[in-house]
């Protein structure tokens, strides 16, 4: 983090200690989806990922709620970053995040009641999702609102992407359906353990294994090119 | 840093944020707290009506399902331990314990639908139970809430062949068995979900046991 200070040009923004280096906006957005994916790379937010990823509809609902909270809390925190005293920043961040989470919880209860019922306590628990406070502290509290929103959107979509990978695998194998539509006909015996916690651990392990293998392969290719 | 003790003349190493006064910290938190409270109060008021509407529709749908499409429904409220057509002033109809009496198009009573709850394998199993209070025959059941094991215990809600088995059975009281049965007082449980199945049977027996005398007392007193 300290070396980045040297590369930062003298911009209009005063230098904030630990601020992310200036980058094109598309990178701020894309980083959360790929190179710095909150679940696959940073390994944050694993608890909701594990708990609700047994149905694709859950993944869509949870992803949408998290994106909403992440984008709006990033925007607000970024706009207010010079107003909020450092000493109480975390308390204020949590307050802002909790407000948006409660709004999304109430709206889901009112307009998508079935989804809200299956997600249960995991929507209110977005408050303590470390992705959101992590982005507020590491990014949104130190940059301008446009970058903060791009980052929030990217990280949110990255979270949703990881959720959907897990949800699709678990629902297809565990229930034989995709978004509730039967895929394999009546003779398919669903592997029920996949939609229960053991299946979640297994799927997550397989997902990280694939990510590791991918990374190793990429490294080997680079070494080959260099040689 | 120079490293000498008497360096009071604006050291470059002093932190950029020299700290804020307690008043400012307090004001910031109080201000954001009040703002959040205001926004949430507004959202709560705006979403309350649809949330309640959905809850009401859900109950009404379940009542109609377990009573087999009644043409007329009477709502009775439980006040103290007695049934009443009206609630005492100030009581919330949404929160009150209710019984629904359904009639067919000839005005004959089909049965009564009540909500009852009992512990299952994982958590409470909540059912809407429809039955004929004079015979104890079930007109239908519907699971309103359960958190049984996915794929096994949750069949009590998702497997319609299981819930349909109850229609016409006599709950005076009802019993469970693992094999096929034609006995009117016995119902076949789900393989691999005996505890969840038995929980359903327990809720049904509890509903008939508690609500039959309540309705009888209500009708004896003239049904007012």
Image (cartoon, coloured by chain):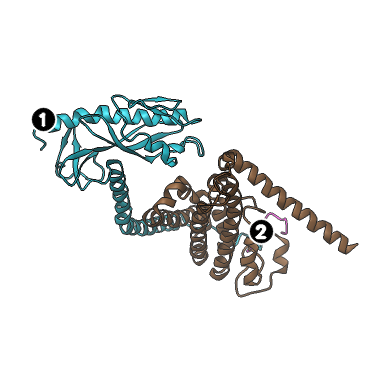
Q: Position of residue B188 (x, y in %)?
A: 42, 29
Q: Colour of chain A?
A: brown
Labels 2 and 1 positioned on one and the same chain:
no
Q: Colour of chain B?
A: cyan
Q: Is residue A191 left or right of residue B100?
A: right
Query: Which class describes the residues within 10 Å of circle 2: few (<14), some (14-19), or many (20+)?
Result: some
Q: Is residue A37 left or right of residue B146?
A: right
Which residue reaches farthest left?
B222
Q: Chain of mark 1?
A: B
Q: Nearer the viewer, residue A67 or A169?
A: A169
Q: Residue at position x 62%, y 55% from top?
A: A38
Q: Residue at position x 38%, y 32% from top?
A: B200
Q: Position of residue B123 (x, y in %)?
A: 43, 34
* Residue A133 sits in quarter: bottom right
Q: Which residues are magenta?
A: B1-10
The residue at which mark 2 appears reads as A36
Magenta span contains residue B4: yes
Q: Residue at position x 47%, y 48% from top?
A: A119
Magenta segment's dominant SS is loop
Q: Nearer the viewer, residue B85 or A72?
A: B85
Q: Nearer the viewer, residue B75 or A28?
A: B75
Secondary structure beneath label 2: loop
Q: Does residue B157 show up?
A: no
The residue at which mark 1 appears reads as B220
Q: Position of residue A83 (x, y in %)?
A: 48, 64
Magenta span contains residue B15: no
Q: How many numbered callouts? A: 2
Secondary structure beneath label 1: helix
Q: Does residue B170 show up?
A: yes
């Amino acid at each position: 983090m300290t070396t980045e200070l040297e590369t930062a040009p003298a911009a209009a923004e005063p230098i904030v200690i630990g601020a992310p280096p200036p980058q094109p906006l598309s990178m701020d957005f894309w980083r959360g989806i790929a190179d710095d994916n909150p679940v696959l790379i940073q390994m944050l937010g694993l608890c909701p990922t594990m708990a609700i990823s047994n149905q694709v509809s859950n993944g869509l609902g949870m992803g949408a709620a998290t994106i909403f909270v992440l984008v709006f809390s990033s925007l607000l925190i970024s706009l207010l970053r010079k107003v909020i005293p450092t000493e109480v920043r975390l308390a204020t961040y949590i307050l802002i995040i909790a407000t948006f989470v409660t709004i999304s919880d109430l709206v889901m209860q009112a307009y998508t009641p079935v989804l809200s019922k299956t997600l249960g306590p995991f929507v209110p628990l977005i408050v303590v999702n470390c992705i959101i406070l992590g982005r507020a502290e590491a990014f949104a509290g130190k940059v301008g609102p446009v970058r903060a929103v791009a980052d929030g959107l990217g990280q949110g979509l990255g979270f949703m992407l990881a959720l959907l990978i897990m949800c699709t695998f678990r629902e297809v194998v565990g229930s034989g359906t995709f978004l509730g539509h039967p895929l394999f006909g009546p003779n398919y015996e669903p592997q029920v353990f996949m939609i229960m916690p053991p299946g979640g651990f297994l799927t997550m392990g397989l997902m990280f294994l694939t990510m590791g293998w991918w990374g190793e392969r990429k490294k080997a290719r680079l070494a080959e090119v260099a040689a | 840093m120079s490293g000498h003790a008497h360096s009071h003349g604006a050291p470059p190493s002093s932190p950029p944020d020299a700290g804020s006064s307690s008043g400012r910290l307090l004001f910031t938190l109080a201000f954001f707290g009040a703002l959040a409270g205001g926004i949430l109060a507004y959202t709560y008021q705006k979403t309350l009506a649809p949330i309640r509407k959905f809850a009401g529709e859900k109950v009404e749908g379940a009542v109609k399902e377990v009573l087999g499409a009644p043409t007329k429904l009477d709502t009775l409220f439980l006040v103290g331990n007695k049934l009443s057509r009206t609630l005492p002033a100030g009581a919330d109809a949404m929160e009150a314990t209710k019984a629904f009496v359904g009639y067919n198009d000839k005005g004959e009573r089909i049965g009564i639908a009540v909500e009852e709850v009992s512990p299952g394998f994982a958590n409470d199993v909540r059912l809407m139970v429809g039955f004929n209070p004079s015979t104890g025959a079930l007109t239908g059941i519907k699971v309103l809430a359960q958190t049984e094991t996915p794929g096994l215990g949750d069949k009590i809600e998702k497997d319609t062949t299981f819930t349909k088995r109850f229609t016409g059975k006599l709950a005076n009281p009802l019993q469970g068995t693992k094999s096929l049965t034609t006995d009117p007082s016995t119902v076949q449980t789900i393989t691999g979900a005996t505890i969840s199945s038995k929980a359903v049977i327990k809720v049904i027996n509890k509903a008939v046991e508690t609500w039959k005398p309540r309705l009888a007392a209500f009708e004896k007193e003239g049904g007012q």
